[in-house]
Amino acid sequence: MSIVIFPPLLHYYYGVQYEKGMVASEAKVNARLLTQMIGRNPTMWQFETLRIDGLLQTNSPMQQIVVYNAAMEIVTQTGADQVPSPRVSFAQALYDGGNEAGTLVVTHSASGVAQSSVMLSLATLIVGFWAFYFLRTFPLKLLKRASDQASYLASHDPLTNLPNRSLFNEWLSHSLADVDRQNTSLAVLCLDLDHFKEVNDILGHAAGDDLLRQATERMSATLRSNDMLARLGGDEFAIIQKHIDQPRGSSALAERLISSLSEPFNLDGNEVLIGVSIGISLHDAGEKTDGETMMRHADMALYRAKSDGRGTFSYFENNMNDALVARKKIEASLRSAISDNQLILHYQPQIDLATNSIKGVEALLRWNHPEEGLISPDAFIPLAEECGLIIPIGDWVIQEACRQAKDWPDLTFAVNVSPIQFRQGNIVRTVSNALAQEGVDPSRLEIEITEGVLLAHTDETIEILKELQAMGVRIAMDDFGTGYSSLSYLRRFPFDKIKIDQSFTKDLGTCADADSIIAAVIRLGASMGMTSNAEGVETLEQAELLRLQGCKEVQGFHFSKALSSASISELLADWHWNSYADENQPEITEQTPKTGEASE
């Protein structure tokens, strides 16, 4: 309002003040002239009206000059008979020898100032209106735009521009109500891109982002107009499919998605193959199923699809819920396994083929569950990696192995390290502290890693391996020959040992390809100064063939299964081998694996 009111008021006020100043100045000048005339004719000046009019000389319709005598009678009047309002007047006394002889009154019209003030008022009113409109609406538009943007960002994924989990859950609730009203069915598909993490780790996050955008385009192209696609986070997506017969519609969509996403992706010149696993839950009209339950069911089905080998889809079945409950129960028990001393280590002897003696042992983790008994690591290590328990479990394994290794000071001992523990834990500090606290010579410890450790952040990983090796710790490449880039890693890091995977050993002597591969690996290791170890040796013939091919070290059920620390001490005391063909081997070497126990 101030922009409308104050400018005209100020203009009028200062305009009137200016007019008053002009009138006062004019009155004083004219009064001085009349005073001189009165001085020359003090008694008759009142009758010289023509002369007075000549001195005053004004014909302006906006001005009036009146001369009064001492009795305030009008002597003469020039100018306008009526001056337009508003008016400004100024009276100036006329003197005769120091005595007041009359008064001169000059009156000017200030209508021009008033008119200009009115015009200014109109102008400022217009300006004020637009200013008010602009200041009122523009910020609101900005605020609305910012609010809309914030709302969009809160409900959409900025990378793919797909709805996020929050909006998807809202859609799902509305869709369930919609299909119930229309007496139709609905499907929820949960998707997980296979091998996305490897792409992220090997090619970088920029390539991973590009892959997500391309995958989104392909998925969108397979959908109908009323299907709803959302990104839940990471490489997880979800789709709502309604108004189509189920399960026919969802199975057809799943097949289209699998086919589309199995085609190669071009990521900055790199051809990448991934795939997708899909879990599906169905809802029929009238069922008492909410959105949260449908998502949980689809997640269970997705877990089954990934367990079945990926690149496939699976429907939710009621027994999956029982399996999930059992899995959660195992997870809860696993969290207390360390504090309750339920984890134990068994050790499988490693045999020096040149001397027929036990050279070292490999530490193998077991879970002595109070209800289930001994549980193999294959049954709980993947779960520990998923729920973040692998790091404290791995640290415990290293500490416990160093502690128990003091019972057989002449043996080396190997410990397997999870890729997750290697990337997210502090493996150098863990190993250093364990060796120092238990007083174990670092050269006795052997850290076994798989190719998975080297897949992510290869340069940083190699630096960590060098730090461990500088401490005196030996490094072994486990499961050699089963990965994609084992040979390239041998060039980049000087491993102390390579372990031939048991998948090759089991075919030794019966498959020419296996014999050739093993012989090549042994020669390769020898040429690079690395000890070769063959896992899964179960017969005397396999051991003899490996010795003839130059293998330095073996382990497997032919020699011994994995034993407790105390049993290792007993085995060392009873070990009297002269050759592998000796029929008087200790009784323990004749033991066969328990049902479900793999040869390690």
Image (tube, helix red, strand yellow):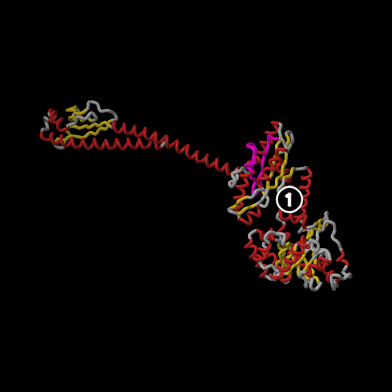
Front residue of 348 and 543: 543
Q: Quadrant of the C terminus?
A: bottom right
Say which quarter of the image contains residue 338: bottom right
Q: Is residue 199 above or below residue 25?
A: below
The residue at 73%/34% (across/down) is 285
* Three-letter amino acid code at the position of disc 1: Gly
Front residue of 275 and 18: 275
Residue 415: x %, y % from top left: 74, 64
Q: Visible in this render: residue 241? A: yes
Residue 447: x %, y % from top left: 71, 65
Q: Is residue 443 left or right of residue 19?
A: right
Q: Which residue is mark 1?
A: 309
Say which quarter of the image contains residue 101: top left
Provide the residue span drawn in magenta: 219-244
Looking at the image, the residue that sits furthest to the top is 81
Residue 94 part of the magenta-drawn span: no
Residue 71: x %, y % from top left: 19, 28
The residue at 72%/38% (across/down) is 248
Say which element carries label 1. loop
The residue at 28%/32% (across/down) is 110
Front residue of 89 and 365: 365
Residue 227 part of the magenta-drawn span: yes
Q: Visible in this render: residue 341? A: no
Q: Is residue 1 left or right of residue 143?
A: left
